[in-house]
Structures are given as C-alpha cells and as structure tokens.
Image (spheres, rainbow, N blue to C red):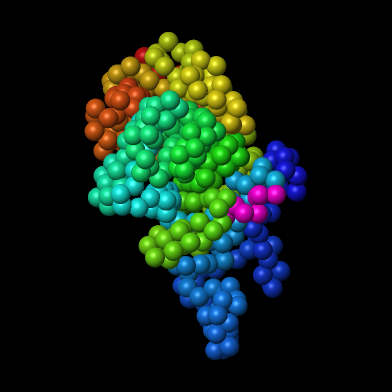
Amino acid sequence: MSSDPRPTLATTAIHAGEFHDPTGAHIAPIYQTSTFTFEDMDAVEAFTNGESDAYVYTRPGNPSRAALAAKIAALEGIGLGGGRDQVKAEIFGSGMAAISAALMGLARAGDHLLTQQVLYGSADALISNVLTGYGITNSRIPALDPAALERELETHPNTAVVYMETPANPTMSIIDIARTAEVAHAHGVKVVVDNTFATPVIQRPLEHGADVVVHSTTKYINGHGTVVGGAVVARDSEWMTERIKPLVGGLGGVPSPFDCWLTNIGLKTLPLRMARHSENGMAVAEYLDRHPAVVATHYPGLPGHPGHEVAARQMDAFGAMIALDLGSYEAATHLLDRVKLAKLGVSLGNVDTLIQHPASLTHRLVPPDERAASGITDGLVRLSVGLEDVEDIIADLEQGLSG
C-alpha cells in the first residue's frame, strides 16, 4: 500500500480489518456472545501459556470489536509509511470512556495535565472535576499558544499530558498539532488529540506528531446515529498493550458486538460521507458568513477564521461542523424554534443535519464564567451539517433566520 494516504482511504475504509468466516459470508458475522468455549484442556493450556490468542470472554476481547479496531487503526496510520503497522486501536463503550482511558493510561496521581481553554462539556467535567479527585491537576491555556505552553510546562514539570480538541467543540477553534507536539515532546510530555470532528479521513494527528488519538465513534465514524462508542489509537503498540489493554478488561467500558458491527458498517462509507459533509459544510458556512442576522460564523474553511492557515496545513478538508453566534439567547432561540429540516438535539456527525444550543445542552454544566472564557456565548449555536441537498439545508436556515 502506498504511503500516500489520499489514493487509499476509501479502499482501507472498506477492506482493513475485514475477515470471512468458514461459511463464506461476504459480511463478517456479529459475534453476539458473552463467552467463547474451548475444545479441550490442551486448548486452555495453550491460551494460558500465551501460545494462542483465543477469545475467552467478550469484555476483554471479541472478533467484532477487533475488526473495528483494526479498521480505525489502519485509517489513522495510513500516512505513516512503514510505521503504520505499529498503530493499534482499542474500542470503548463511549467517547468519554475512550478519553478517560487515554488520560488514565498516561497520567497518575501527582501528575499535571495541560489543555486548551474550550473543551467538550463532558471532557471538561472529567478533567476539572473527576481526575482532580484522583490527584491529577490541570491548567488551561487559551488556544494552547506555544509560548504560553512553554511557560506552563516550565511551571509544571510534573506535566504528563497535553490534551487538545481540534477543531474544538463547540467553538471550532484550531490548534497547531505539530507545533504543540514539538513543544510538549521537548519536555517529555505526551500529546493526546480528540479527532472526532475531523475523523481520520480529513485529519490524522499521528502524522503531525501526536502520540494518542481519541474518537467518539458515535459521531461521524458510525455516521447514522445508531450507537454510542469510542476509540483510543496510538502508534506505541507497547503502551497500548501495557497501559490501555488492562483498562479495557479492568474497567469493562466496552461496546456490544452488535454496536461494533454497526459502527464498522458505517465506517466503510466514511470517506464518501466526509467528502459530501465537507462540501455541504463549506457552502453553508459561506451562506451564514454573508447573512446579516449572523454576528459571527466560526468555520475553519473560511479565510477569515483565525485558524484557517493551520487548518489548511493539517486537514485535507474542513468538515461540516459550524458555530454561529447570533448575538443573544433570544436570537438563538428564534432560529432553533423555527428550523424544520434541521433537528434540535445533541450529538453530531449523522447523515441528517443537527442543531443545538451549547450553553443549554452540551456545555450546560460548565460554569457560566468558564463558558464565557471559552467563547461559548448565550447566542452561540452549533450546527452539524448533514448530507441533504445543500439547497434544502440553506433554505431551512433562511426561513429560520428570517422574521
């Protein structure tokens, strides 16, 4: 396979990790079982002695989950040349389970964690409230500015992790992955990137120096709103085996085989879907950017976006997530109450368009002063642009913004 990721994304998404059982079934079956049996005690001894990779119980391992993990790892590592075979993935029962495992796999009591100011609401709560109870402190750096990051690393020599979202949820701010990794690695610190908004189709953080990638597979990777899941991906296979694998079995936050199977089916069309999502996202962002009722449109594909140049370097397209600020809660409510095609609800990355109010939903538990510091105003609306005809999406927004 060529080291150039662009010609092989679609083929990898369809074929990586696939297997066919002895029946010859074209699509791999769902291994919907809790337990696997052994032929005899010789087979048990072979497993006990490490001479076989037999499946025993679905919590630590299942063929349906292994197939999905192999496919995600192949996509995230597609541009790493000979190093792609070292990339491994583990699948979890939610995106938050994946984020928790990644951070727990890198940080211990007494360690420090650095991150950007704005974070997905549940990740914010994990870092600010949960991990602190286990002795892992944290501090925030707006946009992970490199100079400020350098100072903070010097102030906190016990830092173990720099954690980022890019594009960020919900403000669409962009972090320079390569520059952040350069600064962090100079201090012996690992970098974790939440790649949910971009997916490995349009951004592969490992290529830019990140150590670990996390996903909510609930979103674009599944693409159809039918499951909840997450993934941890890293090019350090030893770390995955020694630090992440034990958290799979020990904490047990794993998805069902059926959920893995559904996610794998959705993942096969991810390159095709992301191309259409990105095309629609750009058209909608350009429309919103011109609309007199919209105070600001935050989309990295717009030349006026402060992160546009960085996004153009590290992303192959700009995705379909948009944040629009309407200036007030009343104006946001006016739009959210009037749209018809776009559905009001949390989550994102579905084939259909979703719209939501972060301050009331995904970030409602973030204190108001912290929301303000993160740029999450009461007038901010987050839009996940779907695969409908873009003229219909724009028409729906137009009637929602009018009046």
145 vs 83, left or right, is left
For image coordinates 60% across by 78% down, the residue present is 51
Q: Is residue 137 visible?
A: yes
Chief SS of the magenta region: helix
How far from the left and from the top, in percent, is residue 180?
Answer: 49, 33
Q: Which residues are magenta?
A: 82-88
How far from the left and from the top, in percent, is residue 46?
Answer: 58, 82
For image coordinates 51% across by 61% down, the residue present is 241
State how many labels appear. Answer: 0
Q: Nearer the viewer, residue 240 or 379?
A: 240
247 vs 269, left or right, is left
16 vs 205, left or right, is right
Residue 130 is covered by the magenta coloring: no
Q: Nearer the viewer, residue 37 or 157?
A: 157
For image coordinates 70% across by 49% down, the residue present is 82
Which image quadrant for residue 93? Answer: bottom left
Q: Nearer the viewer, residue 227 or 57?
A: 57
How far from the left and from the top, in percent, is residue 312?
Answer: 59, 25
Compared with residue 105, is residue 196 higher up or lower down, i.e. above or below?
above
